Each structure stands twice: as structure tokens, then as C-alpha cells.
Image (cartoon, grey):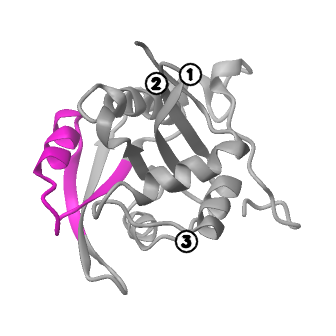
Amino acid sequence: MSIVVRDVREHELDSILELNNAAGPSILPLDAGRLRRLYDSAEYFRIAERDGAMVGFLIGFGSGSAHDSSNYDWFGTHYRDFFYIDRIVVASRRRGGGVGRAFYADVQSYAEVRYPLLTCEVFLEHDNDPVRLFHGSFGFREVGQHVMPGTDIRASMLVKDLCSYPWVRETYGGTLPEVDWLQRRQVTRTADGARS
């Protein structure tokens, strides 16, 4: 019953859309077009499998991307260099079984060699005390709150210092070794070479 975290495959987008929109009020709904844009541009887009079945996904963006989220923009106005968890969804039948912790260990491993901060938000309008406790137990702290335009949803803005980043930066500079586990996900590029 091990949990496997791996990059998403394009044919899994319909299942991801269904999983996202069944998650409840603590996750913003998606349509197929928005999910496709996330798939094409996310720096990190991985799913978790248990017993061969998809049980969740996590999407993230590094600072400097063209991600169009007001929460991402909030972090961009407060921090120069960060990795942003846009959304994490775990199937309701698998919550509390370690999937969220597996995702957060994986995304931290990815981010800490590239960015000094891991960021995310938790909505405050819903009964999210278990979610806030989860993040606090993982080392996140609140650094502010943000009301999302057009939704009136208040979010607690959370950051976690990534203590390995200074050593990695000092040792390797901006060039990491070329090994499989350090490779970035390939994303769609615009005509001018920028990430879309």
C-alpha cells in the first residue's frame, strides 16, 4: 500500500478535473480550459497513486512564472524568490492516510534545491482547522491574509523557510547536477521563449 508520486500524464486530465471539482468548498472549482492552462504552464504537476489508482494531485509554480492567480501575485509582491503551491487535492476516501504528507515531502524536495521559500494559502471561510494544523505541523507560518478579488474568500498566506536552499545555492550556484531526479517538468513556451 505504498504511495507513488509522479508527474501527471495528459490523458489523466479528465480524472484530475473530476477529483478537483468533487473536493468541496476549500478548493476552487476548475473547468477544462483552466486545467489545460495549468497543465501547460505548471512547473510542478504531479499525481499520487495508491494501489495503482489516482488518489490526489498537486500543482505548483516558481516565482517569475506567468501564473494568473491573485494569491500567487500576493506572494510576488511580498517575496522575490519562492515556490507556490497552487492547489493540492486528495480524494476524500484517502484523506488522513499520508497522501498529503507524501506530496508535501515531494514538493519540498523539489523546491528546496531551487527556492528559499515554499508558499501556499489556506481559506479561512470554511472549517479548515485540520488543514491549518496540517500546514503548521509541516513548518508553515502565517505571514498575512488576502481577500481574493471577485470571491470575497479570505486566505491565510503561509510560508515555510527551506533550510537546504542556502547550502545548495552556495555549493552549486544556479546550475544543479544533471540527474533524473532534479529535472524540471517540461512546460509549454510562448513564441518569445517565456513560460506561458
Quick check: 159 above or below 70? above
Distance (Cα) linking label 3 and label 2? 31 Å
The answer to whether the residue labelled 2 contacts the one labelled 1, judged by CB atoms less than 8 Å apart, is yes
The label number, if any, that marks residue 167 in the structure image: 2
Q: Disc 3 vs disc 2: which is toward the camera? A: 3
Quarter location, residue 2:
top left
Which residue does the image show at 36% across and 29% down from the upper left?
A: 99
- Secondary structure state at the residue bearing disc 1: helix
Residue under pointer 3: 68
| Residue 110 coordinates in the image, percent (x, y) | 52, 31
- Examine the structure image and report whether residue 126 is included in the region drawn in magenta: yes
Name the quadrant of the N terminus: top left
Q: Disc 3 vs disc 1: which is toward the camera? A: 3
The label number, if any, that marks residue 171 in the structure image: 1
| Residue 190 coordinates in the image, percent (x, y) | 82, 65
Which residue does the image show at 45% across and 31% down from the upper left?
A: 165
Quick check: 177 above or below 80? above
Residue found at the very far top of the displayed protein? 1
| Residue 52 coordinates in the image, percent (x, y) | 54, 22
Query: The residue under label 3 is which amino acid type?
Result: Asp
Query: The residue under label 1 is which amino acid type?
Result: Thr
Graded by Cα atoms within 10 Å as few (under 14), some (14 to 19) or many (20 or more), the crowding at tag 1 reads few
Residue found at the very far bottom of the displayed protein? 150
Distance (Cα) linking label 3 and label 1? 33 Å
Give the magenta-colored segment's residue range: 119-145
Graded by Cα atoms within 10 Å as few (under 14), some (14 to 19) or many (20 or more), the crowding at tag 3 reads few
Quarter location, residue 29:
bottom left
